[in-house]
Amino acid sequence: MRLTPNTKVLICGIAEPLAIAHVPLMRDYGTQVLAGVSPGEGGRSINEIPVFDLVEEAIATVGPIDVVIVFSPAYAAVDAALEAIAAGIRQVVMVSAGVPPLDMVRLVRRAEATDTLVLGPNCPGIIVPGQVLLGMHPAECYQPGSIGIVSRCSTLAYEVALQLTRAGFGQSIAACIGADRVVGSSLLQWLQMLDEDDRTEAIVLLGEVSGDGELRAARYIAETIDKPVIAYIAGHFAPVNRSIGHANQIVASRTELGKRGKTDVATKVAALKAAKVRVADRPSKIPELLQRALNTKAKAPSAKG
Amino acid sequence: MDLLEYQAKALFAAMGIPVLPSQPIASLQELRELKIPYPIALKSQVRAGGRGRAGGIRFASNTIDAVAAAQAIFSLPIGGECPALLLAEAKYNVEQEFYLAVALDDNARRPVLLGSTQGGMDGKLSAGTVHQVLVDGEFSPFYARRLVLKMGLRGELVPSVSEIVERMYALFVQNDLDLVEINPLGVDRAGGLMALDGKVTVNDSAIDRHTELKCLLNGVVMPPSLKPVWIEGGTVPTPTANATHSTQGAVNGQGSNSTNGDRSKKNANTPIGIVCNGMGLTLAALDLVCRFGGNVAGFVNVGWTVGGGRPETLEGRLEQALASLSHPHPVRVVLLDLLGSAITLDGVVAVIHQYAKRHGWWRQETQPMEELPQPLSTPRSEGDLAVNSLANNLTLNKGRGPAIVLRVLGEPSDETRELIESLPISLADSLEAAAKLTAVLASAPQA
């Protein structure tokens, strides 16, 4: 994906309070928000942006759209994304939170069939500092540079971006994959995109205790990624999960963590370290590890995969 | 949230999954008007597993036995919960017990069918004995047959068990469930099938669009409003807590701190609460406070907006979080870090101040802290310096409310700054500085 100040954006659910608050911030950042969709609001304009009843109607008037950002209510969010896909749009950012998991199963099936990139739901989207803001990242935490951030959690990404910015490391892109149970794209997919992104020199991976996305990511890094990766996993001191019942235990045992019979941060840290990832034990260590990684890389450029 | 067995069975019956004749019993009197013939099973309607072993299922062959059994079950807490209802159910002669379930695989992002011929209370259910079929495309009955054949079934049981799996899948999709489980599915000598026990978990995000499920749940406690995750024994257990709890401890990763020199043992048990927006940030705050030697009693993520009873505004959730950390285990220091949120620092301070006033948290007068503990040692970074300079201006909290360490981006107005100076609120400019200050405050002598 190539995101620039010329990226054309359409907002689904533009009349939702969160959209009303954040669309002006996106526009102030230079993002080209060409149109909005909100059923029943067609013909109005909100924040000086023309509103339509259908995505296809909007495209007919304002021209091609590169990215749709969905702010629609939770139960209408997947429908909005499916509408965007039907209108030929292949990049969808879902900000809406609390989307029912089985709705997401339908969307994921459709996205896979159409080769559509879906980010979220329940995520603040993407920022390419100095170029374009697709969602809700607070601009003051970021500055342009060459560090790519991929994170499970929104606010932890802001925290780390701010520390990088304060330490003089700008960012090439930051994406948060979303906090809902079923999300459109994984840490692994975003690592792949950051690896291919020529503006990104090093990658910061921010994970947490639950799930096993970090272990899949570790395996992918070991096999494929050549760029330096720094990771921080939150939740060293989080209480151990309560018993989750037979079916869920068995489903969990399908996953990497389940196979290892462990579900803690230490397992993830060990897997990442085995993949030659530098793991910070606290967010403030990330800039230091990054500096070291970049120094090493400058001295001895290696070639993997 | 989990449905009770009788509610799950009502859904099964409506979907055409065979269940035994049964009758919910709310009082002993109702046993005298029983519509099902003896012998019966009386089953405690609680959510906890292992009811049978705990004594929550008893059999009776006449009214006298039934009343005695019911009395015993009503007063028997299982998993801390006494039943409000019993389910009286006809008996069924079982030849075999199967396990069937439909669940969601978060990683594959698809529903998964699960089945085993070794179901029942003492069934050995594990990844080794339970067969799985991922529903990767649109569902069609062949997925169910695939599972049934994997389970090793042949002959008449293939269509009959497949049909039950199909109906479970339909129930799963139509009601937005997280889980449908039948354990055991009883098989009698003639090959007849009966869902003898069932578990249904409703998805909390989707419940609002299922009015019939809401009706079914009517009168049942809805999921809690914003509640902290309490850490049993805290993150720095007292020696007694260590002795009484298992050596695993209540908290993950405890073994890994021995190398961490930041840990201070002084006043290690002053309980700390953490309030952040976003789970990653909350967990990062938890980790940092622990590394600085703080004893975290509980944490709340106020970023999560979805679910029963949570206020829609961040202001509302913030108030609820402050309230929740005051009861039943009042914390003495709260780390509050809201990053990229809709409210300004002024707004957050106003919410805290209003709440504190209403609940008489803090006495009017404050006084400079006379003696500051010294776990900061030599400053190592700008953050440390910031903490030290802040710590010098600390005020001793003499009220019953907690001291608050606040981190919100942006500068306070002059008015807010004055207000902050008169209250036990300290500002920090990074998560780490906030965590360190929190640990320092918690190790200070408490009023």
Image: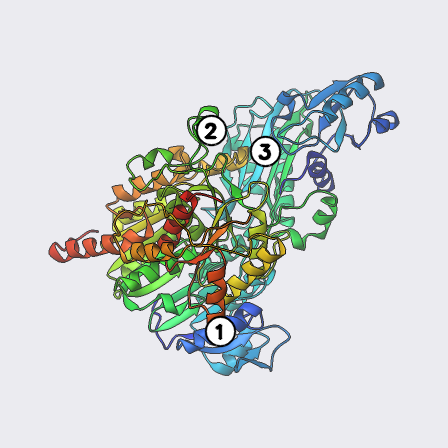
Q: Amino acid at mark 2?
A: Ala
Please tell me which residue is depicted at 29% across the width and 63% down the height of the picture: A166
The residue lying toward the viewer, choosing from B171 and B167, is B171
Q: Amino acid at mark 1?
A: Val
The residue to which callout 3 is attached is B100
Q: Secondary structure at mark 2?
A: helix
Q: Amino acid at mark 3?
A: Leu
- First in sequence: mark 3 vs mark 2: 3
Same chain for marks 2 and 1? no
* Circle 3 crowding by C-alpha within 10 Å: few under 14, some 14–19, many from 20: many
Q: Which one is in front in this view, the residue at disc 2 or the one at disc 1?
A: 2
The reply, left or right, for residue B194 in relation to residue A261 is: right
**Picture coordinates of residue B443 (x, y %)?**
40, 43
Chain name for mark 3: B
State the image quarter where residue B246 is shown.
top left
The residue to which callout 2 is attached is B241
Looking at the image, how many numbered discs can be counted on the residues? 3
- Residue A257 to residue A172: above or below: above
